[in-house]
Image: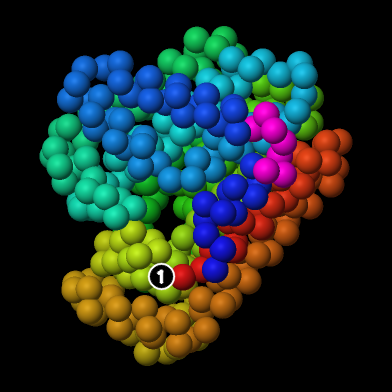
Amino acid sequence: MTSATARVGAIVEVAGPEIPALLARVEQRLAQLAAGHGPVLAQHAGATIAAGGKRLRPLLVLLAAGPAQEADEDGLLAAAAAVELVHSATLVHDDVLDAAPLRRGVPTVWSQGGRELALATGDLLFSRAFAELAAAGSLAAVRALSRASSALAEGELAQREDAWNAAVSVARYLHRCELKTARLFEAACELGALAARRSERDVTALGAFGRRIGLAFQLLDDVLDISGPQSVTGKHRGADLLDGTVTLPLILARERDARLCALELRSITAPDQAEALCEAIAASGALDEARSRALAIADEAKAELRALRLADRQRTALELVADSVVARRA
């Protein structure tokens, strides 16, 4: 299996020589922002940002902007940092809600410092995100990230409302995924396009591309929760099931296996029970169907790019992002 790091490296290489330097400056900016708010919060905010993974969302900001010479570089860097700060904030708050001891195999802020410190850390990250965009002076960018942040909150509320309800429909599940994940991908692409001063039509089309790859990304995350070992996902297999979160693999498996329709999800209380349910879901063929749906959505994302006038490197890099989010396997 090609590692996630290698896939991102391939995208960066295709995108052009300016992208690694810009990503390094985004990283520096994130570190500076985390360090500027007192030692306790800085420690936890800094650790959260440092454990932030592949920086896919900031990369999308840079790729959506493309090699346009007229791009506002300061606004571009602010946008890339802001998107990652919002993403990090949501992870910290999610860990509080889920009482999660680990995130990507690393102890969470909640497990190390408790609920109040974790909430304060998440709030700090959110506030710094909007301060970055406000300082860059783009009202349109602030609006785009605000819409995405509101969607994140709505998605979390919808997920809590649906907890333990195994009869959730596919349409309801996809709506939740769009709110909780896809809208921030959409905002990342919109922010990059705005910083490059692209047309309103291009901003909309690139945003639609981002929304679709965000949706495909979430579908694959939910497949990996069922199929993936902790060494790949950073959490126990079936963690979503133990949390009462109903995802596409379970929804599809219930359509295929009548025995799962009678299952009371609240009865799954231990890791070995979750493991057994994961095996039943996999045996139903639901994982292959969920992957196929994610692949189809990624293809739809690439189709959004056809109507745009993009540099060859930019188009290829964006297409590789769409491919990479559905290439992950346990």
Quarter where residue 72 is shown: top right
Quarter where residue 265 is shown: bottom left
Quarter where residue 53 is shown: top left
**To which residue does mark 1 refer?**
228
Is there any visible trace of residue 6 in the rendered image? yes
Is residue 163 left or right of 179 when viewed as pictured? left
**Label 1 residue SS:** loop
Residue at 37% x, 46% y: name it: 156
Residue 316 picture location, percent across and down: 76, 47
Q: Is most of the magenta stretch helix, strand or loop?
A: helix
Is residue 80 left or right of 307 when viewed as pictured? left
Does residue 49 lie above or below 222 as drawn?
A: above
Q: Nearer the viewer, residue 110 or 1?
A: 1
Does residue 276 lie above or below 72 as drawn?
A: below
Residue at 40% x, 64% y: name it: 232
Residue at 67% x, 29% y: name it: 18
Is there any visible trace of residue 143 in the rendered image? no
Residue at 19% x, 42% y: name it: 110
Q: How many marks?
A: 1
Residue 252 picture location, percent across and down: 50, 76
Does residue 299 lie above or below 307 as drawn?
A: below
Q: Residues within 10 Å of mark 1 (few under 14, many from 20)?
A: many
In what quadrant of the picture does the N terminus appear? Answer: bottom right
Is residue 326 left or right of 13 when viewed as pictured? left
Look at label 1 and name its amino acid. Gly
Magenta-colored span: 13-19
Does residue 121 lie above or below 320 as drawn?
A: above
Residue 296 picture location, percent across and down: 68, 64
Q: Nearer the viewer, residue 179 or 55?
A: 55
**For residue 234: magenta?**
no
